[in-house]
Image (spheres, rainbow, N blue to C red):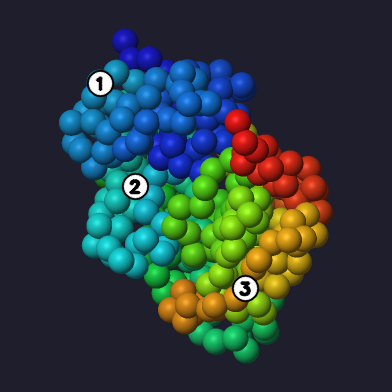
Amino acid sequence: MRKKVVLITGAAGEIGHALVKALARQSEYPLVTLDLQPLPEDIDGLSTHIEADLLDANVLDRLVSEYEFERIFHLAALLSTRGEFSPVMTHEVNVNGTMRLLRLAAEQSEWRRRPVQFIFPSSIAVYGLPDLETKRQYARVREWEWNYPRTMYGANKLYCELLGVYFSQYYRQLAAEQPVMVDFRSVRFPGLISAFTIPSGGTSDYGPEMLHAAAKGEPYACFVRPDVRIPFMAMPDAVKALLDLAAAPAENLSQRVYNVTSFSLSAEEFRAWVLKFFPQAEITFEPDLKRQAIVDSWAADMDDSAARRDWGWQPDYDVQRAFEEYLVPNILQLYQPA
C-alpha cells in the first residue's frame, strides 16, 4: 500500500527551507522532499529526502510506486537572472518539470477518486509593463493585467499557471467520463526576503543582497536605480500564504491564481531601512541596464484584494516589523563569529 505523504520539490531552496520547517510542525502527513542538493543541516531529518533530478523519469516512477500524494508543493525552479543565461534549460526545468508533476497529480487524483492538491508559487515576473509611464499609471496591478513577461522565468511561470488551470478545469474534457481534477492553487509572490538563506539568482535579490552585505560589513553596489520600485515580502509571510491558500475551503476560491504582497519600496527606500540598522554600510548604485530593464517591467505593487476576500490573506509583517523583528536580528545572528 502506498504511503500518504506531502511532497515538496525544490526543498533546499529559500522558500523550501522555511516551508519544510513549518510543515514539519503542523502537517498530518509525513513529508517527502526532492531536490538536486542535500537539505541544509537545520532541516535535515524532518523529511524523507530524495536527492535527485525531477526530470529523471526513474525518480517519478519511484515516487509513484511508493507514495500517495495528499498535497504537492512544487517549488523547484530556475530563477529569473540565471534563467536568462540558459533559457532552454530553464524552460526544461520550469515547464517540463511542472508538466510531469501535474500529470502525476492528475493520474493519482483519478485512481484515488479524490483531488490531489497542487500548490504552485508563481512570481511578479509574470508581469511585463512596457514603460515607466505605464508602470506609474498602473500602480497596483491585478492578476489578469499586463501578463507580458520579458524573461524566460516569467514566461514559464505564466504558462505553468495556465497548465494548472487546465488540469483543474479542462483535463480530458472530451472523455466519455469526467475525470477527477487536480486541485491546483497558485500564489504570485513579490520579491521575497529571507534572513536565513543567501539570495540565489532572483532579479529582485538586490534588496536582500543589501542586507546580507551590510551584516557582513561588505560594500554593495546595487544593480538597479535608486528610484525603481517593486513590492516585497518577508519569508515567513510567503510560507503563511502558501499554507493559508492550501487550507482554504475550495468553495471559497473564485480563481486559481492569486496575488499576495506585503510592502512596496523603492531601492533607495530599501537602502534607507538597511542604513537605519547598519549605519556604516556602504551601499552604492551601479545599475546593470539589462537587469534594470527587467525590474522596470515589473509592477510597482500588486493588488491582492482577491486573496484577502476569498481566503482571508493578511501579511503579518509590514516593512517595520519585517526589519525590526525578523530580518535584522536573524541576519545579525547568522553572521556572528562562532
Residue drawn at x 65%, y 38% is 336
Q: Position of residue 234 (x, y in %)?
A: 67, 49
Q: Earlier in the sequence, mark 2 or mark 1?
A: 1
Instruction: Kindly identify the amino acid type of the residue bearing the numbered disc 2.
Output: Thr
Indicate which label's residue lies in the foreground, 2 or 3: 3
Residue drawn at x 34%, y 47% is 98
Residue drawn at x 42%, y 30% is 39
Is 294 on the left or on the right of 25, as rendered? left
Out of 277 and 163, give the one closest to the viewer: 277
Residue 267 disc label: none
SS for callout 3: strand
* The furthest residue to the bottom: 133
Local crowd size for mark 3, using a 10 Å CA cut-off: few (<14), some (14–19), many (≥20): some
Is residue 62 visible in the rendered image? The answer is yes
Is residue 229 visible in the rendered image? The answer is no
SS for callout 1: helix
Local crowd size for mark 1, using a 10 Å CA cut-off: few (<14), some (14–19), many (≥20): few
Residue 107 lies, with reference to residue 237, above or below; the image says above
SS for callout 2: helix
Q: Position of residue 151 (x, y in %)?
A: 40, 70
Pointer 1 residue: 65
Residue drawn at x 25%, y 21% is 65
**Res 116 quadrant in image:** top left
Pointer 2 residue: 98
Q: Distance from label 2 to label 3 (Cα)?
A: 39 Å
**Res 275 quadrant in image:** bottom right
Instruction: Kindly identify the amino acid type of the residue bearing the numbered disc 3.
Output: Thr
Pointer 3 residue: 284
**Callout 2 touching callout 3 (CB < 8 Å):** no
